[in-house]
Amino acid sequence: METKNMMKYVSILSVFAVVGMFAYLVHASKLFSYLTEDPKVCINCHTMNTQYATWQHSSHRERATCVECHLPQESLFNKLLAKSRDGFKHSYAMTFRTYEGQEISASESAQERIQANCIACHREIVSQIMANAKLYEVKDDSGQIDRKCWSCHRFVPHGRARGLNATPDNLGVKEI
């Protein structure tokens, strides 16, 4: 009988320990902040300090958040799917230090999303560029029409500083 009671207490204690660890993990990771569109979420860990700090000083700060540029806008499901997939990749890379060098770069799917969002926000000028390009099409077309927006606008909105250690400990990051 005494062993049975002891097992009961150990089981209850184990359940409380697991629930407590889960609650701590939710709190420490600021889990619920990832459900928002607040740009400060991008600096919950120190990975995106440079990108956040440079965005704050860009022309896009008043017009577009991280989510509006980097996540799909057509459906909530696609947005949450991309956000969770990218978040997992970021947390894995930071936990296991798999970032190559000191620079973060967008994956192919992220580049497609960013390009689509650039075009969606700047659709008037893009349509004018496309119309002009058709007027002046050259036979030996070099594929310039297929370039990504940032091939010309490289430093919009994140500036020149790109390394993970360019703004250590949130230096340069201000509350907005």
Image (cartoon, rainbow, N blue to C red):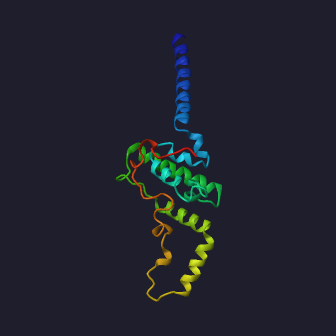
In the picture provided, is 20 more to the left or to the right than 47?
A: right
Towards the viewer: 169 or 116: 169
Please say if 92 is above or below 148. Answer: above
Q: In the image as oriented, which residue stretches furthest toward the bottom?
A: 139
Towards the viewer: 73 or 84: 73
Residue 54 lies, in percent from the top left, at 48, 54
Q: Quadrant of residue 171?
A: top left
Residue 168 lies, in percent from the top left, at 41, 44
Q: In the image as oriented, which residue stretches furthest toward the left?
A: 101
Q: In percent of the image, x 39 and y 52: which residue is there?
A: 163
Total number of numbered discs in the rendering: 0
Q: In the image as oriented, which residue stretches furthest toward the right?
A: 75
On-image quarter of the N terminus = top right
Q: In percent of the image, x 37 and y 49: which residue is there?
A: 98
Residue 156 lies, in percent from the top left, at 50, 62
Please say if 147 is above or below 65. Answer: below
Towards the viewer: 142 or 65: 65
Q: In percent of the image, x 52 and y 30: which residue is there?
A: 21
Residue 42 lies, in percent from the top left, at 52, 48
